[in-house]
Amino acid sequence: MDKILDESAALDHVLLTQDPEQYDKLAAALSSKLRKIPLEDLAATQDILTAISPASHTILYLYALLATIEASSANGRGVPRQLPPTVLPEAPLWPHIVQTLLDFDPIQVRYCGPQLTRLVDYVAWGAEQTSNYIPAIQLLHHVILRLDSTASTLTSTHRSFIRLCLLSQAYSEAIDILDRPIYHIPTTQVDPRTYKYLCSSSDPTWTYLTSATGLTHPVSSRTYLEYYLLGGMCYLAMRRYKDALFFLEVVITAPVLQNVASSIMVEAYKKWLLVGLLLRGAAPSIPKSASQSAMKHIRAAAKPYECVADAFKVGNAQKLRAEIEAGGNIWQEEGNYGLMVEVFEAFRKFSVLRLGRTYDALPISEVARRTSPDASNVDETRVYLETLIAGGDVKAAISDADGTKDQILRFQPAATTFKPETEYERHLAVQTRELKSLLGHIQDTEHRMEVSKEYIDYLKKLKKAKDEEKKNPVLGASTARTATAADDVDEDMMEEY
Amino acid sequence: MPKFDLPSYIANYKGRTVFRRLHLIASCSVPLQEEAARMAVIEAKKRSDVRNYHEAVALLKKASQGKKVDKLLDPVWAAQQEKKNTAETARLEGELKGYKNNLIKESIRMGNEDLGNHYYTIGDLNNAVKAYSRMRDYCTTASHIASTAFRIIAVAIEQKNWLAVQSQVHKIRNLQMKPEDTVRNQPKTFAAMGLQQMSTGDYYEAAISFLNTDPALGDSYSEVLTSNDVAVYGGLCALASMTRSELQTKVLENASFRSFLELEPHIRRAINFFCATKYSQCLEILESYRADYLLDIYLQPLVADIYKKIRTKSIIQYFEPFSKVTLASMEEMFGNPTATQGGGSTPAGQQGFLDEIIGLIEDGKLDARIDLERGVLNAVEHNVRAEAQEAAVDMVDGFVREAHMKLLRLQILNAGLEVKAPPSKKKPAWDGDNGEGPWDDSASAGPVGPGGRDIMAGNLPGSTRKGG
């Protein structure tokens, strides 16, 4: 045991910077050695958990902790398919778990990925079992960022985290992660070119956040579909419809094989339609990259939603109300009732906004006649307009009441509603930064997947050359050409001298 | 009430179009119904199309409403003509067979032509097209091909098969012909092409075609249309589709088209008024001829559309130089197209006009806003710089979004994560009718653990025992 402790202690930053090769070897050896030690032995040295710190002895600590958990569940009277009580919050092992997840060494942990992932699973699962989400959310949030401060590689932890956030309605925590865009999705095969040593800290995150190191479960199509659907729902809860639309669109444009569609895609499509209505006042057009056959199935399954979208488009409040009321049970069952209510309210808002595109000013009674469900109740319409104006949704003003005459709703001219130029400048600067990072990732991906334009051109050229060679097997032509080329060079050289 | 005189109008035409025009007038115009029907019967009897004759008789019976018309009717003639037609068909078919046996190209061509002509005159248009198409295989010279194409065009126009007209016109235009033949064919091809474009709604193209039609057309194409028609069609199409300056340069200052316009001076006046921004007079003239045009065989289905386009354009052009116009003055100018003259200021008419303006704004044709409080139509002031900035920001947003989406897709494909059908089930994985939530669906690629409660449980069993 002491020997192992020594080996573990050797893995420090000095070695990492001086001799990464040695570090790599040592860490791998330590991990495999620990794997061979019987569980009981590891678990028996209970005091090790208190004696060493997980920050410097991450590998050892993780193995020991898991062994202890296993041991406690083996001799405990654990209910099947339930976590051993020892790993739940407030239980004896909980502080150790928390300490590990907070302090683990991000380099060492690459050599014991499966163990960390298992610990994360315990925490997530435990949170669901006890409905005590907050500590788990905070821990997972920390783990994701500690492993990868940009959080740009999708892992199974992402999905678990978002699910917990949604269950506990901790949307702002979720959005903190969701706002960091995903640029990479781990593959199951390891690309041999990606890194020299697992420990080189300069490597981009996608080189070690894979199922090969065990830092994530294998990512399935379901994992990322769920991540994006759940993420979209978080954005919805925060009313960030634009981001929600993007997340949902990722789901519905998911590539499909054969003639199938996932029911996750169906769910996403339903929400996507409604969000489109909320955001732009019109059903969004189906993206070109969406699979046509899948879309056919999805649309057939989401018929009631399309009916609502159609009614919205036609601009008939009565019809929209009828459609929404007719599908009451469906929305309720599928958890889209709240969204539907929003859509109905948005309809009236968009009707008023549309008036702004036709009128400069018009009497409120006219607004009521055109947009209100109850045309005779002018006062109600005025109150409604006032809330819209106060909320900044409609840029307009209502003239003062003056006795008998109708009050007038006057829209502000479009020219004055533009933002000041400094605002644009700032916005453009943000966008430039965003673009730069995105382009970096794109180049990186293109290079990694061998799809960059230059490379493909090069391949084409190679193939052409090969074909040509095949066509004229007489070597004379090509050799002659090279010979002349060589001659040319010679001549040039002669001239120079 | 139409302004034209029926007998002199119909005398301009010859061939089958005479009957078709009479038939149309008899079935659509109340005042001219009886006269047209009578003429149609006489016309039909002169020719050999028995079906036309029956149609005309039916129309006449309806139009005369019990009055004595028997002296015009001649059932015996119909039966005899029917027999004659069949005999003629048989004879021509026989002859054609003979020619075919002799393998003389020219004879076969002529045999087919005779047969086609015969079918055409007795009203069997489908067989006529077939015969003419067969005839083309035996054409040897460019002029033969041209004449075949013209025959097919004539039939296709009667069938309103505009696609066929278009393809035949192109065929003629691509032919290498002697210069004098080209000159002879030019007016007819352009007129046919204009007709086709107008009927398919390409008013601008149609206007250009009609404007390019050579005045040599005269009455050489009277089995389809007359020079008067070219003037009317060309003028209306131009009014509906061209800007004021285009109208000035391409129509009024067009020397060759001027000779057409002289035949229909009111069209020229209308265009003149339009160019002089006197829109109400222009519309008034057109309105007074609406009844006439509704009785034109080709114009009838298009009149409403063309008139609406001209009206819309007038309103837009009228508004262009202003930044503010009172609604009242605009209404005075344009009134209500359906209201009777002089009664334009009724509340209903006012609302109708307002709705028209609203429609134009909503379609994006009129860049203006209505101020109901002051009764004014305001032009929208544009802040080009700000709009450009806004557009730039939006564009970058769109690009980032799209690029990110594509990148993700690439990553997904690279990781081999396409949505697949689960291997165990035969039917497609999704089934919306079950109302499955996202948690217990069967479409997952990952296995759901035994008694799997949810996604998390699905993932755990794989890893729990690994440490041992």
Image: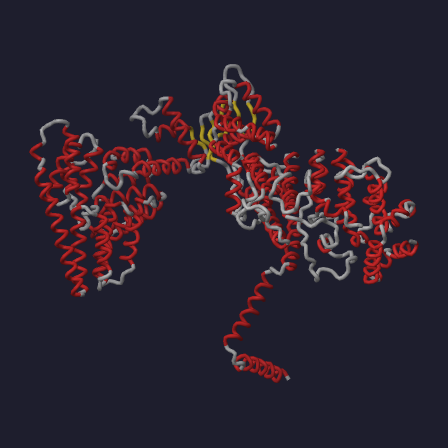
Q: Nearer the viewer, residue A156 or A374?
A: A156
A380 vs B276: above or below: above
Q: Residue at x 77, y 34 (%)?
A: A130
Q: Looking at the image, which is closer to me, A2 or B20?
A: A2
Report x, y in % for residue A18. 84, 61
Query: In x, y percent, where is residue B198?
Result: 30, 45
Q: Quadrant of residue B301?
A: top left
Q: Nearer the viewer, residue B82 or B441?
A: B441
Residue A395 appears in the picture as rendered = no
Does the rendering let one see residue A1? yes
Q: Residue furthest left?
A: B71
> Would you say A216 lies left or right of B120 here?
right
Query: Image point 64% across, 41% down: which residue?
Result: A423
Q: Nearer the viewer, residue B42 or A425?
A: B42
- Residue A96, compared with residue A192, is above or below; it is above
Q: How many marks?
A: 0
Which residue does the image show at 18% across and 65% down from the upper left? B103
Give the x, y percent position of residue A29: 83, 59
Taking the image as shown, residue A84 lies to the left or right of residue B445, namely: right
- The image position of residue B450, as x and y in percent, is 69, 42
